[in-house]
Image (tube, grey):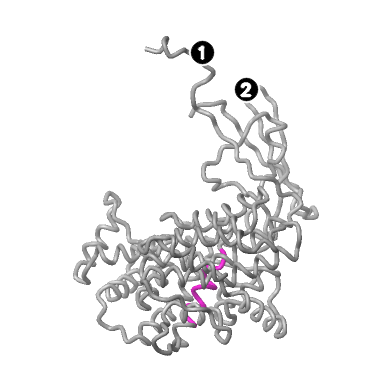
Amino acid sequence: MQGKARTVAMTTQPKTAPKTKRSKTVTLKDNQTDQSWSFPVLEGATGPDVVDIRKFYSETGMFTYDPGFTSTGSCDSKITYIDGGKGILLHRGYPIEDLAEKCNFEEVAYLMLNGELPNSSQKRQFEHDITYHSMLHEQFHNFYSGFRRDGHPMAIMCGVVGALSAFYHDSLDINNPEHRMVSSYRLIAKMPTIAAWAFKYSLGQPFIYPRNDLGYAENFLHMMFATPCESYKVSPTLAKAMDRILILHADHEQNASTSTVRLAGSSGANPFACIAAGIASLWGPAHGGANEAVLTMLNEIGNKNHIPEFVKRAKDKDDPFRLMGFGHRVYKNYDPRARIMSRPCHEVLEELGIKNNPLLDIAMELERIALEDDYFIEKKLYPNVDFYSGIIFQAMGIPVTMFTALFALARTTGWIAQWQEMIGDPLQKIGRPRQLYTGETKRKFLTLEQRT
């Protein structure tokens, strides 16, 4: 694309000046007309500064061009902070390591929604409220039966979550804080039931209802694997691993699905529709399908003896093959979530007595190589959270088609928190990205007879 060349110069206040939100400006100068415009630079609590370009078009007559919005901040948020270079992930200021090791998923959900960790009484009340919203309306039995048995669980979840708005009319007023809270609780509470029933439906097994005496992760596993034929007790090791997976996937800043939820919500859509939109975005293989890709890769390798060949191919820049589950688009260091998941992964394998599973043998050998091989260390291609979660799901007997559904189950909490924050933001406007038009300019219309 050709256009007028532009030069940008940044000026800042002296370091001794008091730090304010507008202590710096960016000056854009048109070197063809000598016009110049200055825009304030806003400073967050931490992380990169941002140029405030809200008046860019009105002052310059131009738009900015940023495919994928990779250099554009669409909002300000107090929920999640990521420093990919240093491998830092904070939720409401708390390191993910502390939350995963010292909290359960319900505590993290409360933190996301309310900004603070709950005390004992708040925790008990929140867990009670979530538990008693976990049942689905009985008519959803009929709704599920409308899908083919081999329908993808994400297709079912998109439909069912969107349909919640047809059943719960009493909490659709987004301008009513009480309605927003009830809808938020319902979504967080019902998502495990929705996901587990999608799995049961694909098997042709009876739906298992949620139990009020079980915790969040434990209840989900019970609905996934119990049957009416005999009692089923969830392993504490598996429940703890699932709880950590949910925590580690709860939110990840302004990714594609979170941005989709915010964009849908900016139009005033009800929360059930917004979360259904997020599920649809997450379904894409470039976003939520990474742990599925790990299992696909392991199947392609097929045997431990083939690993050296595939590692060699991964190092060849001219070979399109890539090792999935290593490295991360955001983290240019060790994914902090992967560090946390490594130990539970091995605990689950030990608990289940899995010693001779070919795919898991390949995965463990790849993990060893990635942590020891100079090439992987230099390129910072460490195992990421998708690598370990895929292995755990495989070991638990969860089919690959359910992997992204479990991601959606965990991420619902983050989506809801982001949606709530957006609704309460007085600066929020309906999303309306601009474009660089490269099509035909105005043309003369030809009648059908004139077209040859």
Q: Are marks 1 and 2 in contact (CB under 8 Å)?
A: no
Question: Would you say the magenta stretch is mainly helix, strand or loop?
Answer: helix
Count of numbered marks: 2
Q: Is residue 249 above or below residue 438?
A: below
The label on residue 444 is 1
Q: Which mark is residue 32?
A: 2
Q: Is residue 261 above or below residue 417?
A: above
Q: Which residues are magenta?
A: 240-251
Expressed as whole percent of the image width and height from the top left, the position of residue 85 reads: 52, 60
Residues 393 and 174: in front is 174
For the C terminus, give its image quadrant: top left
Q: Residue at x 49, y 74 (%)?
A: 245
Q: Earlier in the sequence, mark 1 or mark 2?
A: 2
At mark 2, the secondary structure is loop
Give amino acid for label 2. Gln
How far apart are labels 1 and 2 at the CA level?
33 Å
In the rendered view, does 32 fall on the left or right side of 370? right
- Please state if 446 lies on the left or on the right of 367 as rendered: right
Amino acid type, mark 1: Lys
Q: Residues within 10 Å of mark 1 (few under 14, many from 20)?
A: few
Q: Verify whether residue 358 appears in magenta.
A: no
Would residue 243 be counted in the magenta stretch? yes
> In the image shown, does 339 or 69 lie closer to the viewer?
69
